[in-house]
Image: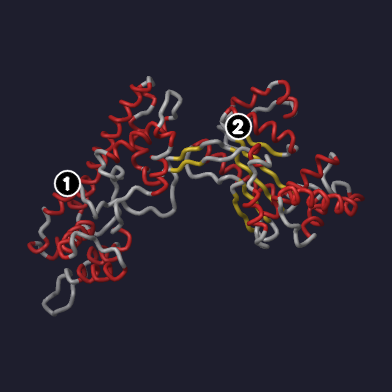
Amino acid sequence: MNSDVRGDFVDETPEHLLEENSEFFNSFSVVVATGLTEKTLLLLSSLLWEAGVPLLVCRAYGMIGYMRLQVSEHTVIETHPDNVLDDLRLDRPFPALQEYVESLNLDQMDLKDHSHTPYVALLLKYIQQWQKENNGEIPRTFNEKKAFKEMIRKGIRINEEGVPDEEENYEEAIKAVNTALNATLVPVNVQNILNDTACENLSSESKPFWIMARALRDFVENEGKGALPVRGTIPDMTADSERYIKLQNVYRAQATKDVNAISNRVQKLLLDLGKPQDLITEMDIKLFCKNTHNLQVVRGRSLAQEYNPKTMKFQDIVMHLNNPDSEMVFYVMLRAVDRFYTEFNRFPGYFDDQVEPDIIKLKTCLCRILQEWGCAPLAKDDYVHEMCRYGAAELHSVAAFIGGTGAQEVIKLITGQYVPFNNTFLYNAMTATSATFEL
């Protein structure tokens, strides 16, 4: 283990701590629970839900892995999405970008300069030419983009032999048409955050995330004119160093301008809320502005809501059970196993000589649960037999998998990076498949 890691332990059972010193759990940033009975787990989850402390339940039962994340609200700025589109603003260029592109005269350039003009500048020039011929619209449909690509291709210089020169910047511009010509809009997930009541109704209890979100909303409605702040980065491209750096500085300068505008709004909001001015630093605001296109808010449900018949999502469970390949059947089986433990104070199949009798008892528990939930009986009894054969054993391979994935989720919660799952995760080691459900 890393030498910087420190650990501690308390030689008390969770049940004793919950009864004698329940505030013990409130001091943690995340609580990971494993091996708890259903009764103890529900008590712990209710306590942590009230305290606002995330709870991650991990379980390995035979060939089945289970995790349940209980968190009331988790905001993520650095989501690290897999595919990020460049923020080039070609459909609505800001003044400095427009001025830079207008300073470039392609017709008067020699071949060297012509073939090293950044493709972003080429795209903007041809977009403006397209807009003059198409009522100010940018290419949107497949056929329009195809015609736009041909317009760009015609701009490639022809040598004395009548053969097009090899201009990589033009080829880059043509390849970028499908990804660079996106309308500058506020993504739906971000717009939902800006319209959220937590963003609208700030108070002295509001988290820094929501204060910055409110400043962002006011920016979008005013300085941004319906757009998020410029990200300030550009992709690599074929260009000479001087013009590439100049183009890069154009985007960076606009990004800095937008950050300053949002920073001013944040400071005013902090003053109005009576919060210290250093609660949100300049670095916090820069990081927030850089990632505004991919902000996420995860709002979960408590275990109490999941187990309460009045708030339980019966219809979702029934819908998934109708799919014979759904992993939802293992969630139902684990609930049946817990019901069995509640009634008999042991898990089915725990003793070798009780495996066969426990099959009947577990099937009775399962049928009772399905009846309570309004679900049809399971088509096969194989799952009941399998759970009894497991005997509540924790296989090392399944436990290791759940331990590793659980550790990743804890890191997400602590660092505020990447998006945690919401809210139930099931792993089937027999088929090496997994699924998440919101229960």
Residue 24 % position (x, y) = 65, 23
Q: Is residue 361 above or below residue 267?
A: below
**Callout 1, which amino acid?**
Pro
Which residue, given by chain and number where applicable, does mark 1 sit on? 95
Residue 127 relative to residue 30: left or right: left
Q: Which mark's residue is nearer the viewer, 1 or 2?
A: 2
Residue found at x 70% / y 31%: 43
Sequence-wise, the earlier of marks 1 and 2 is 2
Crowding at mark 2 (Cα within 10 Å: few <14, some 14-19, many 20+): some
Check disc 2 and report its element: helix, strand or loop: helix
Location of residue 312 in the rendering, given as x and y in whole percent from the top left corner? 65, 44
Residue under numbered circle 2: 49
Above or below, comparing residue 61 to residue 411 in the picture: below
Which quadrant would residue 151 be assigned to in this image? bottom left
Q: Residue at x 62, y 39 (%)?
A: 56
Residue 301 locus on image (x, y percent): 59, 40
